[in-house]
Amino acid sequence: MSTERPWVRGELSWLKSGPLYRVHTEAVAELGRFLDRWSYRRIEIDGYLMTSRREAHNVLKAAFQFPDYYGRNWDAFNDCFGDYVAENDGALIAVVWRDIEAAARTAPATAAEVCWGLISHADQYGPRLDPTAGAFVSMDVFAIGTGEDFDRPHAA
């Protein structure tokens, strides 16, 4: 198990956002090369499918391959995510949330809640100073969109 963790904004210096990295659709190919170079495991989520709280949890359940008994709430997410971390101990995980703007338009409070949930779990299960302290994953969350709020390299 490697404890080396990429410095996202160091390698993608055009990124100004974070901890939710907002990537313009024009920079998705560059993001993909970065994720490939570091052998991230990708978790893809589709903002168009997040039309309600229940549907957002259905998307998360499918993306993280949670079991059928997943309760579709944040307590259940926490429990199942702990199991996910144990199963993927030491992995680099990239959550790539496509069309976050669609989720924000359709179900704004739910989109904000999902964002908070993903970022807080990324922090909670991130690398620890003591590698014997239990399972962890290094997880980064990338929101993909088209507006001015999304970062991309400047044209030369």
Image (tube, grey):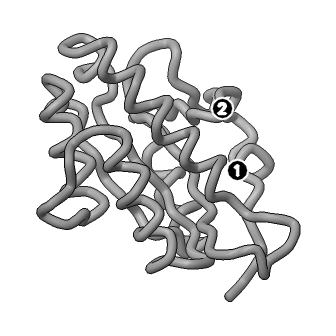
Residue 38 position within the rendered picture, expressed as x and y whole percent measured from the top left: 61, 71
Compared to residue 141, the image places residue 44 above or below, namely below
User: Distance between the Cα atoms at labels 1 and 2?
Assistant: 10 Å
Compared to residue 15, the image places residue 91 above or below, namely below
Numbered tag placed on residue 8 in the rendering: 1
Please name the residue shown 44% across and 35% down the image: 143
Circle 2 is placed at which residue position? Answer: 18
Image quadrant of residue 97? Answer: top left
Please name the residue shown 79% across and 64% down the image: 128
Under circle 1, the secondary element is: helix
Image quadrant of residue 130? Answer: bottom right
Please name the residue shown 12% across and 63% down the image: 68
* Residue located farthest toward the bottom when viewing the structure as drawn: 1
What residue type is disc 1 on? Val
Residue 152 position within the rendered picture, expressed as x and y whole percent measured from the top left: 57, 31
Task: Please say if the residues under marks 1 and 2 sit with CB atoms less than 8 Å apart.
Answer: yes
For the C terminus, the quadrant is: top right
Under circle 2, the secondary element is: loop
Q: Nearer the viewer, residue 98 or 51?
A: 51
